[in-house]
């Protein structure tokens, strides 16, 4: 017996392309204590990704009132255009890893930077409050 089977069209979610893995070039930024604030600029369409590798880092974004204090292992990202100002908090050195990528529809979540062989274990990321417009949590 022959039967005619009409397939059900896939839902729109199934029609989308699979997530594209991101390949990022992470840059390591040493932040000596009591040094001048360093500026990171990102263009429109860029996503700025930050992760503290060591120490405590102060981050502020031009045009926003909030400041962020990130501990080792914590991450934060911002949608460009954005100018970020970063420095080590306190009297201890810090190290910030940062990367940028173009915002692409269907892109997967960005991978974390590769940990150096001699790194210390990362502290757990605490729950943070609501982020300002333009900020995206990457934790």
Image (cartoon, rainbow, N blue to C red):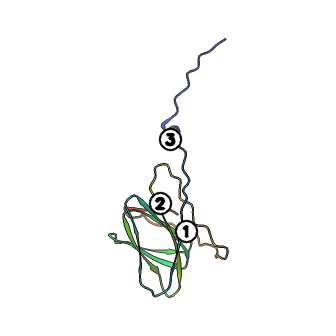
Q: Nearer the viewer, mark 1 or mark 3?
A: 3
Q: Is residue 105 left or right of residue 53?
A: left
CA–CA distance between discs 1 and 3?
A: 32 Å
Name the residue at 62% across, 70% down: 115
Please say if 23 is above or below 90: above
Please say if 3 is above or below 17: above
Residue corresponding to mark 3: 16
Percent of width and height locating residue 77: 46, 64
Please say if 124 is above or below 44: below
Q: Nearer the viewer, mark 2 or mark 1?
A: 2
Name the residue at 51% across, 29% down: 9
Quadrant where the N terminus lies? top right
Percent of width and height locating residue 113: 58, 66
Name the residue at 40% across, 72% down: 84
CA–CA distance between discs 3 and 2?
A: 21 Å
Residue 46 versus residue 130: which sits nearer the camera? 46
Please say if 35 is above or below 81: below
Residue 100 versus residue 16: which sits nearer the camera? 100
Of the two numbered discs 3 and 2 on the same chain, state the one appearing first in sequence: 3
Residue corresponding to mark 2: 101
Q: Nearer the viewer, mark 3 or mark 2?
A: 2
CA–CA distance between discs 2 and 1?
A: 23 Å
Residue 133 picture quarter? bottom left
Q: Quick one: label 2, few (<14), some, or many (20+) residues within 10 Å?
A: some
Residue corresponding to mark 1: 125
Report the disc number at residue 113: none
Residue 125 picture quarter? bottom right
Of the two numbered discs 2 and 1 on the same chain, state the one appearing first in sequence: 2
Residue 100 versus residue 61: which sits nearer the camera? 100
């Amino acid at each position: 017996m022959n039967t005619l089977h009409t397939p059900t069209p896939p839902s729109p979610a199934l029609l989308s392309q699979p997530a594209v893995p991101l390949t990022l070039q992470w840059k390591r930024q040493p932040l000596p204590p009591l040094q001048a604030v360093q500026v990171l600029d990102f263009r429109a369409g860029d996503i700025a990704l930050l992760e503290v590798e060591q120490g405590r880092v102060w981050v502020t974004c031009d045009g926003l009132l909030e400041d962020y204090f990130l501990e080792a292992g914590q991450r934060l990202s911002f949608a460009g255009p954005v100018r970020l100002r970063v420095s080590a908090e306190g009297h201890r050195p810090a190290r910030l890893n940062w990367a940028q990528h173009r915002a692409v529809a269907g892109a997967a979540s960005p991978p974390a930077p590769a940990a150096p062989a001699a790194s210390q274990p990362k502290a757990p990321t605490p729950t943070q409050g609501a982020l300002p417009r333009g900020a995206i949590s990457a934790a």
